[in-house]
Each structure stands twice: as structure tokens, then as C-alpha cells.
Image (cartoon, rainbow, N blue to C red):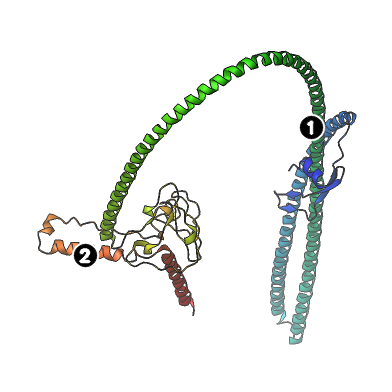
Amino acid sequence: MVIPNTILNSLKPAGTEWLFSVRSDNDTLHLYSNVSNKATGSVPIGPTVAEIAAQQEAAQAAAAKFAAAAEKARLEKEAAAKLASEQEAARIAAEKAAADAAAFKVKAEADAAKAAADKAAAEKTAADKAAADKAAADKAAADKAAADAALAEQKRKDDAARAAQETANAQAAAEAKAAEKARIAAEQAAKEAEAAAAKAEEEARIQAEKDAQAAADAAKAEADRVKAEAEATAKAEADAALEAQKKADEEKRAADEAAQKAQEEANAKAEKDKQQAEEDQIAAEQAAKEQQAKDDKAAQDASIQAEKDAQAKADADKAASDKARQDVIGAKPNSPDQLPTDVPKEAPKEVLVPHIQEDKKGVENGGIEFFGTQSQPQVVQENGKLTPPPPPPGSGLPIPAEAITTTDTFIGQPGGTAFNAPDIAVPVELVPIDIPAALNVIPGVGAAAQAVNQAYVALANIGNDMSPITRKKAKKILIATVIVAVFRRRLP
């Protein structure tokens, strides 16, 4: 990230010491430092030319030193990551050693139990063999001695297994502690290396800005000098030209005074002739204007009549088209198809008022007035605000919740036109059924099929006189009803 020197100087005076915090991250092992390293840098007041030269030499040496330091920091960071990986492997090995020790303890206990059982069986066999030669008291004493020996042996083995487990646990804890200590040291080394690299980069950037500013100042001083010399030369030339112009003006004034008198006499005659010519021209222009006014009025009358005739024809054509469409869809036509295709129809201020939507029965889309364009229609909501335009068809842009949608709106949208219902009416037109000749000859079949077709179209067109505002409300009520029904069904 680069912060321009001008921004720093606009916040605090030049020379202020700024404190920056740099966070060290290790994305490979997902290790993050809790405290950021801090690197400081200052923004001094502009240096002199001598200081600039010295700073440039120092900057070149510092850049090489900072590059070496950055490379060293990178290598140290990689070594720290490798050390952390090795420590993780050591921790896993310690956990495995602890698990092996636990398994060894279980096996030792099983072996001790087996040995005790084998010893008891052997002693029992010996006691049985000597039973014929010894009395019952000797047998009881031998059995007691065998039992005491078994208990002593079992205790010895339990103590040995416990000591081995404690030793393994202590060793695993020591190795885990060493691994954690090494990980912390690796994180600290990585943080210091990252901070050194960031500081080197920031100081190099600051020095580069100082060098650029010094060069700009030197260029400006040279440009100012050249400009001053040019202005002095131009002023001297202008003064000489002004003196020459004064002399020429005096000579010309004398000649003009001599010519003026002759010119005045000629002008007086010319003015008289001009006045007469102007009077003649005004009379001619007045006659032409009167004739042009007559011609313009006649042309305007003809144009107005032609517009009236064209409008009357358009109204008649629209009325006929609306009548034909009304016969097909069962409602008076009123849809966004009547809007322009390019320049949106604006909504006047007088319609942008809060109201309660009242749909007109028998009029397509409830008789609501549409604004906008055919592909992006808009209507006035009950709160008096115009609905936002839907996105252009095929754009795939998000559809605002209050936008009025058409079938084309869902082109390029999730679900497409097959799984989305538009907010405007989509009338179903009556298309006569083409009945095969073999069936059409049967009396009543053709008429019945057409009647069924007409009934289907009539049912499909029910609701065409519902406005988009009312249709949106109906959708919300339907969705809420379905959600409540599902919720109730899931209740115990």
C-alpha cells in the first residue's frame, strides 16, 4: 500500500513522526501473531539541493541494504515455517509414543495375569502330586504360600507398569513444551523479519518521493527562469512596437483628417440614397411577408387537418384492435405493450400521491396506468411512489422486490420463464382446434371440442382484470398461507 506524501502533509505538519502497525501472518501453517510489529517513519520538510544529492547516494546504499535485509527476512521466515512444521511432527510423534505406552501397559497387565494363572496351575499340580504323601494341613499351607506369592508378583508388575507410564507421560509433556516454545520463537522471528522488510520498503518509497519532489522543484525553478527571460524580452519588443505604432498613428491621423472631409460629403449623399433604397426595400419586404403569412397559414391548416385525419385513423385502428383483443381475452386491453419501446413514459406529479388501488372490472390489468417502457414497465404504488424498473430482459441482474415483471423480465433469470409468474396479466388467446376429418364427420364432436376449447380459454383468462399491485398482494398472501400451513403441519 502506498500513501502519497501530500495526504500525510495535509493531515499533520511536515516532519511529524508517524507510527505504522504491520501484522505478520503465516498462511501456510495458519499462524497469526497476537501483537503487530510497529515500524516508525518520519516526513521531513523539503531538503536542499546538497541534501538531495547526499540523500540519493544514501538511498541507493540503503536500498541495497534493505533488499539484502528483505531477502534475509524471507529466508528466516521460510526457516521458521520449516521449524514449525518439524515441531508439529515432533508433537504428533510424542502423542504416538504416549499411545504406545498405554498399549504396552495393557499388554503388561495381561501378561502378568497369564503368568499368575500359569504359576497357580503349576503349584496346584505339585500340591496334588504331594497330597498323597502330606497331610491336609501341609496342602493348605502350600496353597496359602502360592497365593501370597501370586499377589506379590502381581504387585511388582503393576508397580513396574505404572513407573513406565509415568516416565512416558513426562517425556511426552517435555517434548510438547519444547515444541510449543520453538513455535513461539519461530512466530517471533517471522514477525521481526516481516517488520524489517516492511520498514525497508516504506523508507525506500519515502526516499523515492523525496527524490521526485526535489527533481520537480528544480524543473520548476528552471521553468520560472526561462519564463522570466521570455517575459522581459517580450516586454522590450512590445515597448519598441508601441513607440513605432504611435508615430504611425500620428501620420495616419493627418491623412485621415484630410480624407474625412471628403468622405463626409460622399457619406451624406450616400445616406440619402440609402434611405430611399431602404424605404423601397421595406415596402417590398412587407408585401412578401403578407404573402408568406398567407402561404404559411394555408400550409399549417393543411398540416393540422392531416394530423387530425391521421389521429382519427390511428384511434379507429386502435379501437378496432382493442375490440378484437377484448373479444379474445375477455377484457378491455390495457397492458405495457401500449408503452414506447425506447423513451420512457414519465409519470406526472399529480398521480404520485398515496391512494388505495381500485381495479376496474373488465379492464386488462385492472385499468392501472403504466409508465416507463414496454420491457421495463412501472406503476404507481399505493404509497404514491413509482415502482422501480425491472432489469432489462436477458441481463440476469437482480429483480427489485417492488418491480413490475413481465414474461420477458425472467429471460436470463434463475428458473427462467417456465418457473416464474409475471406481475402483469398474460392473456390466453383462443386458437381454433384443428380436428381430424375422421372425427369431424361425427355429429357434435367438432362443436363439443370447440366449446371445451373456449371454456378452457375463458377459465385461463379469469383474473386478467387484476392490477399488478393487487396481483403482488395476492402472491404475498398465498406464500404466507402456504408457510403457515406447512408450519402447522409440522407441529406435533
**Residue 122 percent across, percent down from the top left:** 70, 73
**Residue 410 percent across, percent down from the top left:** 42, 54
Residue 202 occupies quadrant: top right
- Picture quarter with the N terminus: top right
Label 1 to label 2, Cα distance in Å? 87 Å
Residue 281 occupies quadrant: top left
Residue 181 occupies quadrant: bottom right
Residue at (17%, 64%) from the top-left corner? 448
Residue at (71%, 61%) from the top-left corner? 100
Q: Nearer the viewer, residue 354 or 86?
A: 354
The amino acid type found where label 1 is placed reads Ala
Q: How many marks?
A: 2
Residue carrying label 2: 452
Around disc 2, counting alpha carbons within 10 Å, would you say few (fewer than 14), some (14 to 19), or many (20 or more)?
A: few
Left or right of 337? Residue 444 is: left
Residue at (79%, 43%) from the top-left corner? 198
Around disc 1, counting alpha carbons within 10 Å, would you say few (fewer than 14), some (14 to 19), or many (20 or more)?
A: few
Asked if residue 234 is positioned above or below residue 14 in the image, the reply reads above
Q: Does residue 443 show up?
A: yes
Q: Nearer the viewer, residue 251 or 277?
A: 277
| Dot 1 or dot 2, earlier in sequence | 1
User: Do the numbered discs 1 and 2 sit on residues whose CB atoms are within 8 Å?
Assistant: no
Q: Nearer the viewer, residue 150 or 411?
A: 411
Residue at (34%, 62%) from the top-left corner? 364
The amino acid type found where label 2 is placed reads Val
Secondary structure, mark 2, is helix
**Residue 400 percent across, percent down from the top left:** 50, 58
Asked if residue 485 is positioned above or below residue 34 in the image, the reply reads below
- Residue 212, labelled with which disc? 1
- Residue 253, labelled with which disc? none
Q: Does residue 73 show up?
A: no
Q: Nearer the viewer, residue 11 or 241?
A: 241
